Image (cartoon, rainbow, N blue to C red):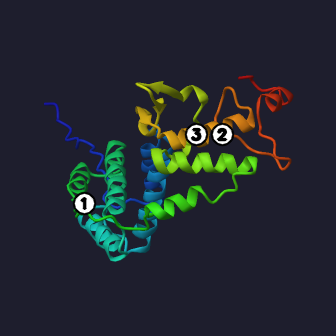
């Protein structure tokens, strides 16, 4: 008779407590899954803050209970509900990627994803500019100087059109188009690769046009560096540097 060998099937058990190398692998997976630089920056900051808190606490399993404790910690710091929910979203995604990489139990990851965020009561928290403060802000730069014209146009676009920093840095003359007798920023690629069209008030376009006329900008990016001599970094500078022309 042939003796049957009793072989136990080897099962790879996912972890319940994640160490720093495991957290770093999961964080890298989260960042690589995002295409927008702003989203990558925000998630990286949120995950780093959670990891610092997680490692400072008694080393418990990475579970729903721990994430609820982290939410309570965020609430005790009187952060805005939107900020808390953003941080919790990053933690949920960290758990999902950790489970997908085989570093965390799927049951624990599922429990973490069920942690609810904070309710938004419709009250804006934080420092918000009043209309008077907004007007004072964009009018602060000196309109007699070239740099002042540029800064006035830049601040006006940020305030009136709600552009993000990377959006206004990538803004070109081609984005400005007239639609139905009104100026607009057309086909602007924003956060997450979303393309949108933004109406531009007439007073904002006048400020932008004043800057473009004074700087002699006829193509390419709208906002450029102004040298100490009061000259913009334009097509002439591009040719000297061997860069592409407009």
As drawn, is 78 to the left or to the right of 49? left
Disc 2 or 1, which lies upstream in sequence?
A: 1
Element type at marker 1?
loop
Q: Helix, strand or loop at disc 2?
A: helix
Disc 2 target residue: 210
Determine the residue located farthest toward the top in the rendered image: 245
- Measured as percent of width and height from the top left, residue 199 is found at 43, 36
* Residue 53 visible in the displayed image: yes
Give the image quarter of residue 101.
top left
As displayed, is residue 241 above or below residue 169?
Answer: above
Q: Position of residue 43 (x, y in %)?
A: 44, 52
Residue on which the image places disc 3? 206
The CA span between labels 2 and 3 is 6 Å
Q: CA distance from mark 2 to mark 1?
A: 46 Å
Q: Residue furthest left?
A: 1
Task: Check disc 3 and report its element: helix, strand or loop.
Answer: helix
Looking at the image, is mark 3 or mark 1 earlier in the sequence? 1
- Which of 215 and 13 lies nearest the eye of the viewer? 215
- Give the quadrant of residue 206: top right
User: Which of labels 3 and 1 is toward the front?
Assistant: 3
The residue that appears at 33% across and 42% down in the rendered structure is 100
Contact flag, marks 2 and 3 (Cβ < 8 Å): yes
> Can you say whether 244 is above or below 15 in the image?
above
Q: Considering only vertical position in the picture, is 141 above or below 163? A: below
Q: Please report the residue visible at 44 percent of the width from the left and 43 percent of the height from the top.
A: 29
């Amino acid at each position: 008779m042939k003796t049957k060998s009793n072989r136990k099937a080897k099962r790879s058990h996912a972890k319940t407590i994640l160490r720093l190398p495991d957290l770093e692998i999961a964080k890298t997976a989260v960042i690589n899954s995002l295409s927008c630089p702003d989203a990558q920056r925000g998630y990286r900051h949120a995950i780093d803050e959670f990891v610092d808190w997680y490692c400072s606490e008694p080393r418990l399993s990475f579970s729903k209970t721990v994430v609820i404790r982290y939410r309570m910690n965020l609430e005790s710091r009187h952060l805005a509900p939107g900020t808390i929910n953003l941080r919790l979203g990053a933690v949920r995604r960290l758990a999902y990627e950790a489970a997908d990489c085989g570093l965390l139990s799927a049951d624990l990851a599922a429990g973490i994803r069920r942690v609810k965020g904070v309710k938004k009561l419709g009250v804006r928290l934080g420092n918000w500019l009043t209309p008077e403060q907004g007007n004072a802000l964009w009018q602060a730069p000196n309109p007699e100087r070239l740099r002042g014209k540029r800064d006035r146009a830049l601040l006006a676009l940020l305030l009136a059109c709600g552009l993000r920093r990377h959006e206004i840095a990538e803004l070109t003359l081609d984005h400005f188009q007239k639609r139905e007798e009104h100026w607009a920023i057309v086909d602007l690629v924003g956060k997450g690769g979303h393309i949108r069209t933004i109406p531009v008030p007439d007073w904002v376009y006048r400020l932008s046009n004043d800057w473009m006329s004074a700087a002699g900008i006829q193509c390419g990016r709208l906002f450029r560096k102004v040298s100490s001599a009061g000259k913009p970094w334009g097509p002439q500078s591009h040719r000297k540097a061997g860069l592409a022309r407009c």
